[in-house]
Amino acid sequence: MSSPVRRVRRLVAAAAALSAVLTLSACGGGDDGGTAKGVELVSEGKLTVCTHLPYKPFQFRDDSGEVVGFDVDILDLLAKDLDVDIEVVDIAWEQIMSGAVFASKKCDIGMGAMTITDDRERDLLISDPYFDATQALLVPADSSVESLADLDGKKLGVQTDTTGQVYAEEQADANGYEMIVFDDSISEFNGVKTGKVDAAINDNTVLTDFVEQNDDTKVAAEFDTGEQYGFPAEKDDENAQKLIDRLNDVLAKAKQDGEYDKIYKEWFGTTPGANTDG
């Protein structure tokens, strides 16, 4: 899977909490804030996007260090509509979910294959849904585990502050497994490969992508959780509402003119509706 070629330059994060900053696209600007087509931005000439890397194929660094992925390409449509760059900030997921990164003006918007939930809608302004998903179970290729019930007395890996963790917590008493919490998806998935955990739960498309690159693992089961992803921004903020309204318009247009299907096929090898993933 490849992503449209963009010119990239590395930037130094202004705050210690920001672990990485990358700029994509073609334009540039200062760091003192600015306005693009009526929307106030944290940095002039840039749409600043907070995420927690990696979460392949939605956002991750390729071999050159560039942040690419499905979410990146979708938000690039918004950046082009605003005629600005994208600046991607790698930061702790909980800071995005709490809304702290928006209140402190570190970012204009967030990304991260984020499932829309009632709890998150209380803390965040969220875009219209842009992707359908569900949870799935990753196990070693030679494992006999086929369901959560098969994990009785075993260890199940979860990623912190995800709906996979929530689902695993809800099913734990009935299935008798011990949960091991990981800070990021790669650590969680590698926990399966190294035997630290017997299985891991996470979003189905992310696990499918991992299995394609790691034939010593497999997806043992999927759970019909009926999830949809959205992009988060600051709650109860007039400017953030303008940004999300513009994104919703961009998403609707992309779905009508075929651009969404083009991006989807590039990252998932099919189009929405051709399978159960989206």
Image: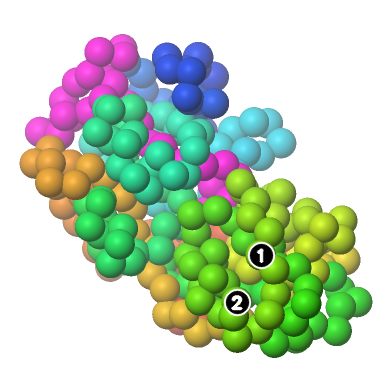
Q: Which numbered disc flags the more N-terminal residue, 1 or 2?
A: 2
Find residue 5 and report its horizontal and vertical position in percent.
Answer: 55, 37
Q: Would residue 252 be found to the left or right of residue 142 on screen?
A: left
The image position of residue 215, as x and y in percent, is 85, 66
- Residue closer to the observer: 191 or 42: 191
* Spot occupied by residue 201 in the image (x, y as percentages of width and height): 63, 68
Determine whether 37 is above or below 149 in the image. Answer: above
- 273 up-or-down from 65: above or below: below
Could you tell me the amino acid type at mark 2? Ala
| Within-10-Å neighbours for mark 1: few <14, some 14–19, many 20+ | some
Q: Is residue 180 left or right of residue 84?
A: right
Q: Is residue 223 magenta?
A: no
In this figure, which residue is indicated by the disc labeled 1?
179
Q: Is residue 195 above or below residue 233?
A: below
Check the image and name the residue furthest to the right: 142
Residue 172 has which mark?
2
Residue at image coords 19%, 21% = 34
> Within the image, what quadrant is residue 259 found in?
bottom left
SS category of the residue bearing label 2: helix
The magenta stretch is 30-59
Which numbered marker is on residue 106?
none
Residue placed most toward the observer, 262 or 186? 186
Q: Quadrant of residue 217?
A: bottom right
User: For the residue carrying disc 2, how many other residues have a C-alpha within 10 Å: few (<14), some (14-19), or many (20+)?
Assistant: some
Q: Residue at x 10, y 33 (%)?
A: 38
Task: Compare residues 129 and 253 and report the one nearer the observer.
Answer: 129
Disc 1 to disc 2: CB gap under 8 Å = yes
Q: Say if residue 47 shows up in the picture.
A: no
Say which amino acid is labelled 1: Met
State the residue at coordinates (12%, 46%): 236
User: Measuring 59% from the left and 80% from the top, which residue is drawn there?
Assistant: 173
